[in-house]
Image: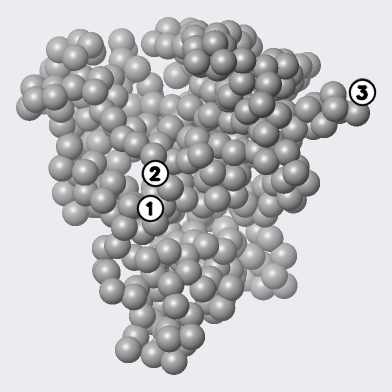
């Protein structure tokens, strides 16, 4: 018996990294010893970093370090998807390895039990047009597409349903899907999970999305503003809570205020994905990119306190600023570091 292990990693493309993958064949003995999910025993593998914007041509060897694995739902059987960190040959993290920056922050504040739910919006493109946009023109204005039903409102459902089934078969923590406000625009949600786990699952779910769309001859775009004009952009609204926030309202307010303290708003926004200024305009359910606000039930605020949280006086907050193309390792690290630092400080007062 042999296993096909699809090694997946994030490259060094700027300003937005891309996913890469290649297949390693594991022999029967190794495969039997591993079993599904035995990532700690999966072998390291090398690759040419000069072809992925991660190294110069004269010294291009880099290392793939397996950190998460799950069943490969496309190939089936005992085949695996293997998410990897990128290391130098001395086994230190490569500068493009944002997961390595998240790990110590997640460990430092693990006692606060931070969890995330990330809402990944994306847009199907056929050529350079969103799926459902007629050639040489525009569809009806947005209004009926969100959570819509019917061939005049919905485009790409067969891809979306297949992607959902594959993610569930892989054991990824998806919690829902829905059609979004523009034709060809959809969303899936991952979580609630711990910072490293939600980010790992999101990257693998993104890889599966690109892989499935490929079979249908369309592109799954994470561009923040895929259609210019009076159309919503694509975000990755990031829901966050700690144990204290799930138990009381004071911690909710502390987290909201921490995100707006001093230089924090711009520090976060600058790392929340390419094209943030095009999407966060103050229109289309966004706050201006250079202004920070929070409020209950306010989808025009930077950070929203959901209505049920306001009623129950406990729960979570939603940072509405991250773009669809945000790196989940970065957004979870920034939010945990900012909010948990302040929550810890308040507990010591």
Residue 140 figure quarter: top left
When the figure is inspected, residue 74 is found, relative to residue 234, above or below; the finding is: below
Residue 32 x %, y %: 43, 86
The residue at which mark 1 appears reads as 207
**Residue placed farthest to the right in the image?**
349
Instruction: Tell me the number on the disc at residue 174.
Output: 2
Q: Residues within 10 Å of mark 1 (few under 14, many from 20)?
A: some
- Please report whichever mark, 1 or 2, sits nearer to the chain's N-terminal start: 2
In the rendered structure, the answer to whether residue 261 lies left or right of residue 243 reads right
Q: Which residue is mark 3?
A: 349
At mark 3, the secondary structure is loop
How many numbered marks appear? Answer: 3
Neighbours of disc 2 within 10 Å: few (<14), some (14-19), many (20+): many
Q: Position of residue 30 (x, y in %)?
A: 47, 87
Q: Which image quarter: residue 143?
A: top left
Give whichever of 77, 16 is nearer the camera: 77
Contact (Cβ within 8 Å) of mark 1 with mark 2:
no
């Amino acid at each position: 018996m042999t296993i096909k292990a699809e090694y997946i990693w994030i490259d060094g493309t700027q300003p937005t990294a891309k996913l890469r993958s290649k297949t390693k064949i594991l022999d029967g003995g190794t495969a039997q010893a591993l079993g599904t999910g035995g990532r700690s025993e999966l072998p390291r593998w090398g690759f040419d970093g000069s072809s992925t914007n991660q190294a110069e041509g004269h010294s291009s060897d880099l290392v793939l370090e397996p950190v998460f694995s799950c069943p490969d739902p496309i190939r089936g059987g005992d085949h695996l998807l293997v998410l990897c960190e990128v290391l130098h040959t001395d086994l230190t993290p490569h500068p493009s390895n944002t997961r390595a920056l998240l790990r110590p922050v997640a460990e430092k504040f693990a006692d606060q039990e931070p969890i995330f739910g990330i809402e990944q919006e994306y847009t199907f493109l056929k050529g350079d047009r969103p799926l459902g946009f007629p050639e040489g023109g525009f569809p009806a204005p947005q209004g009926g597409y969100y959570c819509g039903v019917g061939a005049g409102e919905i485009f790409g459902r067969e891809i979306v349903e297949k992607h959902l089934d594959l993610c569930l078969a892989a054991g990824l923590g998806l919690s829902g899907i829905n059609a979004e406000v523009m034709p060809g625009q959809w969303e899936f949600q991952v979580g609630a999970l711990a910072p490293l786990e939600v980010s790992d699952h999101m990257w693998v779910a993104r890889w599966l999305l690109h892989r499935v769309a490929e079979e249908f001859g369309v592109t799954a775009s994470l561009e923040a503003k895929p259609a210019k004009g009076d159309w919503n952009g694509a975000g990755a609204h990031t829901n966050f809570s700690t144990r204290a926030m799930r138990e009381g309202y004071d911690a909710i307010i502390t987290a909201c205020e921490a995100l707006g303290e001093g230089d924090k708003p711009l520090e976060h926004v600058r790392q929340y994905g390419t094209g943030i200024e095009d999407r966060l305009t103050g229109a289309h359910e966004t706050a201006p990119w250079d202004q920070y606000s929070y409020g209950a039930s306010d989808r025009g605020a930077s950070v929203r306190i959901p209505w049920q949280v306001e009623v129950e006086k406990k729960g979570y907050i939603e940072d509405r600023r991250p773009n669809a193309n945000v790196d989940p390792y970065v957004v979870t690290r920034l939010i945990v570091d900012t909010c948990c630092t302040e929550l810890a400080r308040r507990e010591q007062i």
